Each structure stands twice: as structure tokens, then as C-alpha cells.
Image (cartoon, grey):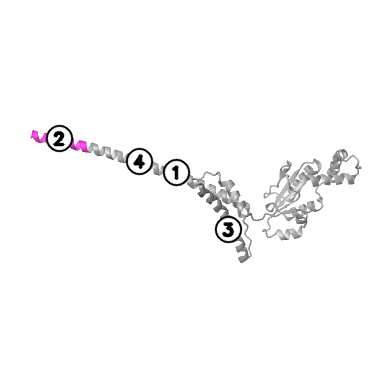
Amino acid sequence: MILAQRTPYLFFLGYKYFQISVSRTYTLNNFMDDLRNIYRSAGRLGQGIVFIFTDNDIKDDQFLEYLNNVLSSGEVSGLITREEMDETLSELSVKMKKEYPKRLLTNENLLNYYRERLRKNLHIVLCFSPDNRKFRERALKFPALVSGCTIDWFYRWPLDALIDVSNVYLNRFDILVTSNTIKKNLIEIMADIHDDVSRICENYYDKFRRRTYVTPKSFLSFINAFKLYYQKQREYFEKEKQKMKTGVQKLFEAAEQVQKITQELITKEKDMAIANMEAEKVR
């Protein structure tokens, strides 16, 4: 599931994507610095930016508290100093006057204009899994993570869609088959296997009340794993085939040599027999 704030067509609009780099030394101060840079880019410079935040980025729940404030009011306490805000509003006064000539240059109007630019240029994409045990707790503790976003649910793909996707990935894949029917059956059985696993996951939940998710990404990984395994096995059997071919060739060469040696022995036996007869005559 993705909790997204105004995400359509952002890629086509040329928005920049940003995601924090969580490490062992990444602290709340680093998060504040990143958030401050995002605000500066979106509000002050007017650059379109998409902030992606996932489950794995939650090193501290205070990260979510700040994001909750961003989504609910747009203001984060202590994020921007008074001096920096005054400098930003002073810089935006020229832009606001050019964009809204009839609007009065007051601090309140400038602040609203700054917030409008933030709302227009900053987009937040929260990638959270509902399977996470802390998901419900965080949603209750920080309500704007849900109420301030548009929720995109990823539902199970129908069998026809799975077959179409499988066809795209496997139709042009080099497979040694005797007919197109076999390749078609392979494409369909890949989709059938994934669809069966999805149904088994539902039965597993009904029986044990535990969720196991099989996503479209799992299906793509399944297809790629098959392609890699097939390629690996094909290379293995090609090597074995070459070894067997070389071995058979050596056997034929050895048979020819044996036949040649046999002929030479027969000839030499005849020569020896003649030599023995001549030796008997001498006696």
C-alpha cells in the first residue's frame, strides 16, 4: 500500500525524487537537515520535488511526528529560523508581485504565498506495508499520515493480466521448444502458478489468521528467477553436451586408431609369417 500526497504524473512533470539515506550514524538532526533542504527547494526555489519515505526509513518515530506536521499544517517547529524565513519571504516578494500584482505585500500574504509554493511543489509518497505490526499504532498516533494522503491500494491481479504480463516477458525469451503451443502453455502455467499461490495465501489466512502477501512484484521476480534458472541450466547442458560431443569424437578417433593399428598388426603378422617360412628354408 502507498499513502501518496498528490502523486499523479509527477514523473512526466520532471519532478526530482528524494529519499533519505539511513545509516548507523543518521540522526534526527540529519533528518531535519534533509527536510530543511526539501523546504528550501520547494518553497523558496520553486523546484518540484517528491519525497519518498518507506517503512525502512523510520529509524525514529519522531521522523513520523515531523511528517505528520508537514501533512497536517505544513509547519514544523524549529525547522526554519526566523532569519532564514525573513530572507525567504523577502526573496519571494518579487515573485509574488510578478505573479499576483494586485496582492498586497504583507507578511501574512507572503507567508501564504510561501505555503502555496510548498503545497504545489512538494509531494510526499509514504510507502508503508499494512502487514507491519506498527502500522496501526502509527496511524492512530500520527493521523495525518492517513487523513492527509490519498491511499493507493494494490489489489490482486486477475489471471488474464498475469498471462499478458507473462507473455510480454517470455514471448521473446529464447526458449528451446519444438512448437509455439509448448511456449504458450509455459506462459500460461507461470500465471496459473502465481494465481494458485495467491489463493493458497487466502486459505492460509482463513486457517491460521496470518497474512502472507503475494504481490505483482513477486510475480515479476518469479518470472525473472525462471529466466535466470533456465539460462543457467541451458548453459550447463550446453557445456555437458560439448563435453559429450568431445568424448564421442575422442572415442571415434580412438576406434579409428585401433582399426589402423589392427590393420598394421595383421600386415606385420603376414610379414612375420613370410619371414618364418624363409627362416625354415634356410635351415
Crowd around label 4: few <14 · some 14–19 · many ≥20 (10 Å): few
User: For the stretch drawn in magenta, what is the main secondary structure?
Assistant: helix
The residue pinned by badge 1 equals 239
Is mark 3 in CB contact (under 8 Å) with mark 2?
A: no
Earlier in the chain: of badge 2 and badge 4, it is 4
In the displayed structure image, the side of residue 207 where residue 253 appears, left or right: left
- Pinpoint residue 249: horizontal percent, then vertical percent: 36, 40
Front-lying residue, 58 or 278: 278
Give the residue type that dot 1 points to: Lys
Distance Cα–Cα, label 1 vs label 3:
35 Å
- Pinpoint residue 45: horizontal percent, then vertical percent: 80, 40
Earlier in the chain: of badge 2 and badge 1, it is 1
The residue pinned by badge 4 equals 250
The residue pinned by badge 2 equals 274
Distance Cα–Cα, label 2 vs label 1:
52 Å
Earlier in the chain: of badge 1 and badge 3, it is 3
